[in-house]
Image (tube, helix red, strand yellow):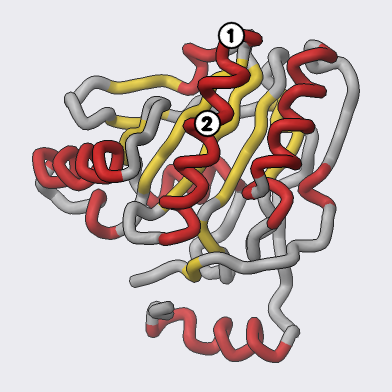
Amino acid sequence: MRIAPATALLATLFTSGLALQAAAPVPRPTKEFTIVLPNGKQQLLSSYRGKVVMAAFMFTTCPHCQALSKVITKLQGELGPRGFQAFGAVFNDEVNTPNPASNAQVTGAFVSQFQVGFPVGYAPRESVLSYLGVSEIESWVVPQIAIIDRKGQIRAQSASRGTTELQTETYLRKYLGELLDEGGAKSATPSKAAPKKAADKKTS
């Protein structure tokens, strides 16, 4: 994994176990978020209000993200009829160029190559970090996950170093099923679980 030079000190602290993991509190109200789809159209997160939404923030170059996209596609097929909707935002350097056509091409290639069966678009890195409540100077990994209930509350979110449960098909199927059944009334905070496996570190 590549580490941005500006984060070298943080990486050292991270390795020695001294780096802090900051995570926005859950539950909390979701904010608006916008992605640009490969066809150039914008897709608003708020358009899925009333559904249980899994928002996945990914790099197109991240193997963990590629694998997760397949898991989410499977869950979309199974749980979509019950009111589940997946929503993907890619935000690595390759989709944050000054050329919208290039950004769209890279995003579309990701969708095609991994047969993604839910909306995925590109977004600015700063917008993603702001939505997640993560600082640019923090150490963080991708994928990052936020799960939103029918009432628009973020009920679970990855820790900055990643939360294995939120990338695991069996856990996600059970947790999403519970949210679909409850209608968003009961609070649950799986993001408090200790992260078990870090994914890909942020890159320059």
141 left or right, relative to 2: right
- Mark 2, residues whose alpha carbon is within 10 Å: few (<14), some, or many (≥20)? some
What is the x, y in percent for residue 175? 77, 32
- Say what amino acid the circle numbered 1 marks: Pro
Q: Is residue 169 above or below residue 197?
A: above
Q: Quadrant of the C terminus?
A: bottom left
What is the x, y in percent for residue 28? 75, 32
Of helix, strand and loop, which one carries label 2? helix
Q: Is residue 28 visible?
A: no
What is the x, y in percent for residue 195? 74, 62
- Mark 1, residues whose alpha carbon is within 10 Å: few (<14), some, or many (≥20)? few
Quadrant of res 113: top left
Quadrant of res 53: top right
Quadrant of res 123: top left
**Residue for badge 2:** 74
Residue displayed at 45% across by 67% down = 202
92 left or right, relative to 71: left
**Residue for badge 1:** 81
Of helix, strand and loop, which one carries label 1? helix
Judge by depth and name the residue closer to the eye, 182 or 76: 76
Q: Is residue 199 above or below residue 111?
A: below
The circle drawn on residue 70 is: none
Judge by depth and name the residue closer to the eye, 104 or 118: 118
The alpha-carbon separation of the residues under discs 1 and 2 comes to 13 Å
Q: Is residue 199 above or below residue 112?
A: below
- Say what amino acid the circle numbered 2 marks: Lys
Residue displayed at 51% across by 47% down = 68
Residue displayed at 57% across by 82% down = 10
What is the x, y in percent for residue 88? 44, 35
